[in-house]
Amino acid sequence: MKTEDKYYLDFEIDKLTRSIENAISGDSFQTETTLLAKADLKTVTKKNGWSFDWKYELNQPERETYKLTIVNNSSIIQGLVSLQINEGHVFMHLLESAPFNKGKNKVYLGVPGNLVAFACRLSFQRGFDGNVSFISKTQLINHYIETLGAIHFGGRLMIIETKAAAKLIYRYFKNNEG
């Protein structure tokens, strides 16, 4: 029996954008978030520069794994998030930007913020008032407080509550149903 891997989320919010934004030109691109399919797994491997085992995430029956893509360009995955619907909130297991959206030469800004906003929106849709929780790496706790309006709940547990969730959703989805 495989013991469950416990990841501490370490995504950085590079910029809160309206959708995602080209890092060089500043052009904004509308996005959509859909369920990750088994066929997508061949592109989201460690061999292709992804840090996490997304096949494992997709095979966890209690989790929902979503991909972020640009509208009309669904073959290129910009980022992934693994969510679990718990009683009263959505729990983020993993969040990762595509390898080309990491580091100083990233192509698009706003991918992590977009995925967190999606998790908040899903929480509202499921009747949980936007409440989202996740376990943070210690060094990023203040970053999440400042950028996402998250609350440090103790230990490494972070909570995004209704007001902060609504702000993120408004920023990312006011003109975009993605």
Image (spheres, rainbow, N blue to C red):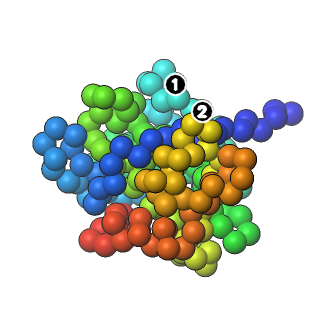
Which residue is tagged 2? 53
Q: Nearer the viewer, residue 127 or 134?
A: 134
Instruction: Indicate the quadrant where residue 159 lies.
Output: bottom right
Question: In the orientation shown, which residue stands out farthest toward the left?
Answer: 25
Quadrant of the drawing holding the C terminus: bottom left
- Give me the C-alpha separation between circle 1 and circle 2: 7 Å
> Residue 163: x, y in percent?
50, 73
Residue occupying image coordinates x 53% and y 29%: 51
Going by the numbered disc 1, the residue's amino acid type is Lys
* Position of residue 121 measured from the top left corner of the image (x, y, whole percent): 48, 69
Label 1 sits on a secondary structure element that is: helix
SS at badge 2: loop
Q: Please, which residue is most extreme toward the right here?
A: 1
Q: Is residue 141 left or right of residue 26?
A: right
Residue 100 vs residue 38, the one in the foreground = 100
User: Where residue 50 sits in the image (x, y, percent)?
Assistant: 48, 29
List the residue tagged with mark 1: 46
Marks 1/2 in contact by CB < 8 Å: the verdict is yes
Q: Give the position of the N terminus as an image quadrant.
A: top right
